Structure formats: structure tokens, C-alpha cells
Image (spheres, grey):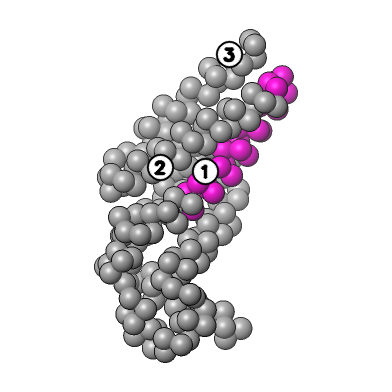
Amino acid sequence: MKQNRTRAAIADAYTHLLHEHTIEKITVKMITDEVGCSRKTFYYYFTDVYDLTRYVCDQRVQAFMNISGGVDSVRNAFLALVAFLNEDRPVILNMFHGYGKEELERFTWQATEHYTRKFITHHAEGSGISEENLEAVIHMYAYMLFGMLVDWVSHNMDSSYEHTLDVALNSMPYIFEKLRER
């Protein structure tokens, strides 16, 4: 139990530092000073700051999946994801503009693929679309929505994601109709 608290304290200190610094500016010493633990304690839990970044992102994925489980539409799921990312805007931007971009993208991809698959599969029930075509649509939308999220973050989360999302989702019935014709 104490191990979980120590690991969480290190992650919290790191997240706090991410409000002010990009990942490459944060040192193990800064983190341990913030927590009040030794470097040895840090290295007991994490191999380096990048390992800690993976841990923090994994925790965020889990937290998001837990709070967004009852979302009723793909639109609401992505708006919930955008709101979730916006809650820690400075942290997200400092991760994205530093060496944490890969981990942030991994987090965003996991959420994107999960919700895209869930909602498109549900929407396609009874449509007569072949499994092969369904998988193609899932991949197309997952990559499109993922790219839209990454683009939104790369532009400092300043633009309206909602409008772009609506345009993308409004094309879905048209695509399903065309696939039914095949």
C-alpha cells in the first residue's frame, strides 16, 4: 500500500512540474525534491523520466476509460476526451511539445480506437456490411479522429474541436449507405 502511495506521489510531483516545464527540462532531482524522497526511491519505481511519463499516461488512459464508460455516442465520447485533455491543458501541451509526444499520442490512440470501434460496431449492427468493410470503416474513422485530435493539440488546443468532429461524424451515415450498396 505504501508503495502505491509513493509511486502516486512521484507521479503527482511530475505532473505538477509538467505545468511549468516540458519533459526534457524536468530532472529526477526536481521530482525527488518535489516529493521529498531520494533518487534511490525514484529509481526503485521508475527507470527514468520517460518511464514515469508512460506510467502517467497509462494512469490517464485508465482514469478516462473509467469516467467515460457510460458515454452514449461517439460524439459525446470524443467531446469527453477533449474536455479531459483540456482539464490539464498545460500538462498536455508540455508533454506534446517535449519528448512526451509519443506517449501522449499513444494515450490518444488508445481512447480513439476504443470508442471508434465500440460505436461504429454498434451503429453497423444489422446493416449487412461485411466484416472486412466494417473493419475498414473502423480504421478509417479511428485514424481520422486520431489525426484530428493530434492536430488540435499541435495547434495548442485553441481551435474548436467540436465543429471538426461534427463534420466528420455527419459523413458516417453516407459512408454506411454506400457500403450497403456494394
Give the image location of residue 170, x and y in percent: 47, 24
Residue 56 in view of the camera: no
Three-letter code for the amino acid on which mark 2 is drawn: Leu
Choose top left, top right, bottom left or bottom right for residue 1: bottom right
Three-letter code for the amino acid on which mark 3 is drawn: Lys
Considering only vertical position in the picture, is 3 above or below 53? below
- Mark positioned earlier in the residue sequence (1 or 2): 1
- As helix, strand or loop, the secondary structure at mark 2 comes to helix
Choose top left, top right, bottom left or bottom right for residue 120: top right
Residue interval drawn in magenta: 107-130
Give the image location of residue 91, x and y in percent: 34, 61
Please state, as top left, top right, bottom left or bottom right, where the C terminus lies in the image: top right
Measure the C-alpha gap from mark 3 to mark 1.
Answer: 24 Å
Say few, some or many: other residues with alpha carbon within 10 Å of mark 1 (under 14 / 14 to 19 / 20 or more).
Answer: many
* Residue placed under numbered mark 3 in the picture: 178
The residue sitting at 38% across, 72% down in the picture is 14
Give the image location of residue 116, x and y in percent: 56, 38
- Mark positioned earlier in the residue sequence (3 or 2): 2
Dots 1 and 2: beta carbons under 8 Å? yes
